[in-house]
Image (cartoon, rainbow, N blue to C red):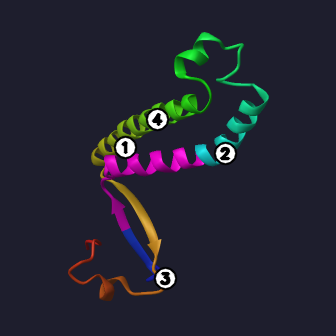
Amino acid sequence: MNSNILKLKLKRVDPVKYATITTVLTLTIMLIFGLPFFLIFSAIGIGAGSESIGAGAAFIGGGIIGMIFGIIVYGVIIFVVTLIATSLLNFVLKKTGGLDIDFEKVGFDFDSQQGDQGRIEQ
């Protein structure tokens, strides 16, 4: 076996941290790609502020207010779904004994660098 391979086993993922990370990343991507389209469509009269939507646009405020409301709702949905998915992942990991992951040692020696503060258990 190659001595540069470090075998680790994934036993658990923190659901709240993972859901937070996933939510922030998804909303960031949504803002980067969605905001320009939203602004273009708002400028030409298509979308939540459009007269053709009528009561729906009035209900959510249309325009920028509608987008802010949508981001909040979408963020909550992403967080809850990821929290549930990560909890299910942890259940499956527990029942199956974990997930073996192979890492390649590059740049430094894990044994000499971990000391008392290291999180890598042998």
Report crowding for label 2: few under 14, some 14 to 19, many 20 or more residues within 10 A (C-alpha): few
Q: In what element is the residue under mark 1? A: helix
Of the residues shown, which amino acid type is indicated by label 3? Val
- In the displayed structure, does residue 13 sit left or right of residue 102? left
Measured as percent of width and height from the top left, residue 16 is found at 32, 47
Label 2 or label 4, whichever comes before in sequence order = 2
- The image's mark for residue 72 is 4
The picture quadrant where one finds residue 30 is top right
Q: Residue beneath label 2, please?
A: 33
Q: Residue at x 27, y 76 (%)?
A: 118
Q: Closer to the camera, 82 or 46? A: 46
Helix, strand or loop under label 4: helix
Q: Any magenta on residue 91?
A: no
Between disc 1 and disc 3, the foreground one is: 1
Does dot 2 land on a helix, a strand or a loop?
helix
- Residue 19 forms part of the magenta stretch: yes
Q: Which residue is mark 3?
A: 106
At horizontal 63% and vertical 49% (from top left) the residue drawn is 32
Q: Of label 3 and label 4, which has the lower sequence position? A: 4
Element at label 3: loop
Mark 3 and mark 2: Cα distance apart in space: 35 Å
> Please, what is the three-letter code of the amino acid marked with disc 1?
Thr
Magenta span of residues: 8-29
Q: Amino acid at mark 2?
A: Phe
Mark pair 1, 2: CA separation = 26 Å
